Image: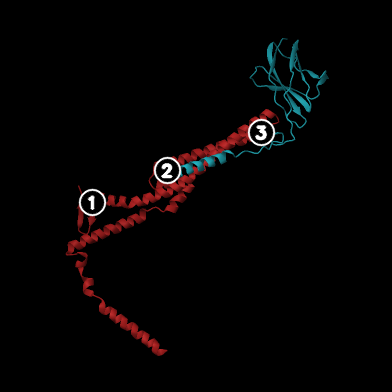
Chain colours: A red, B cyan
Amino acid sequence: MKKIFLLIIISLSLFKIYAQANFDITAFADTLKYNWSNTETRYAFRENLEFKKSLINKYENEILSIPLNMGKSMIIPGWGHMHTEDYLRGQILLSSEILLAGTSYFLYDKSMERYDKYKKADQIDAINQYYSEANTAYKQATLAFGLFALVWAYNVYDTYIVTEQYNDELWVKNIQKELDKKITVTPLGISVKF
Amino acid sequence: MKNIFKTAALLLFIFTLSSCSLDRTNPLDPYGYEDITVPAMVQGILLSSTGGVVNIRWNRAEYVSKYRIYRSQSYDGKYEIIEEVSNPSAEAGNYVNTIDSNVTLMRYYYKLSAVNVQGLEGPRSAYKYILVRP
């Protein structure tokens, strides 16, 4: 058993020595492999790398979470849209929902008021009239509520689409923003665009 | 094709919602309770006036516990109950009731309705009017 164990250790050590023997330190240290012919090109490469890193950091900080945005739209319709800077659509959705919810509540209240009168009525014409009025208002209230639910569902679905689109466009937008900057500080110095 | 399905689903949704109805819970509602019989409209109303008194006559109907007499000063005005006649005097199949003795020179409009034993009031009659002189 001891022999086998010793054999394994020796084999592993030999592999290690062999691996070290194959490592090419010259190739590793060769700065020309990245086309760094001089200090300036190395700085330029670094500048480019820093730029990309900053873009990634900015993108990761500004990217919107789709589930979180959908959750916001579930609570307040249009909220998610406003986060994606689609203010008009957000406002339209929010006002539609307020309008539909208000209409639904108003009609339901009217329907219940007529229904109470119907329940107390003892004259056939009044019974029929109050029931008809209550039922019409109830149907309209149900319809308004149904539309409210439809708009709400659309609002949540649309938040998903809009947020995804926003995240896709964010990368390009950030690059454009960086490129449009008039003053930039780099390891090579300060550059100003006119 | 996809749009047709969407439209059909939306229409079905609206149709389902609009078919929701309230229950008929009024115990006097004949549509909700089959054992309720609606009293018929009061027929044969005749008005006559002598010396500020209006006599109203109408045909007698079955399964009626009382009659309600409404009056207004215009044909499309508000008709108010002026009398509930539970035991009108019988006279050759008609009932006669003197209801008003304080009227002035004016045209008065009347409507009558019958109430069954369960307390359901039937449809009000078409209006009848009479010019009353003091």
Q: Are marks 3 and 2 on the same chain?
A: yes
User: Disc 2: which chain?
Assistant: A
Badge 1 density bin: few <14, some 14–19, many ≥20, Cα 10 Å: few
Along the horizontal axis of the image, is A183 left or right of A72? left
Check the image and report above or below for A162 versus B84: below
Residue behind mark 1: A183
What kind of element bears circle 1? strand
Percent x, y for residue A137? 58, 35
Q: Nearer the viewer, mark 3 or mark 1?
A: 3
Percent x, y for residue B65? 78, 27
Disc 3/disc 2 C-alpha distance (Å): 41 Å
Residue behind mark 3: A118
Percent x, y for residue B94? 80, 19
Name the residue type under label 1. Answer: Ile
Give the residue displayed 36% in from the left and 87% down from the top: A7
Labels 3 and 2: the sequence-earlier one: 2
Name the residue type under label 2. Answer: Gly
Check the image and report above or below for B12 versus A26: above
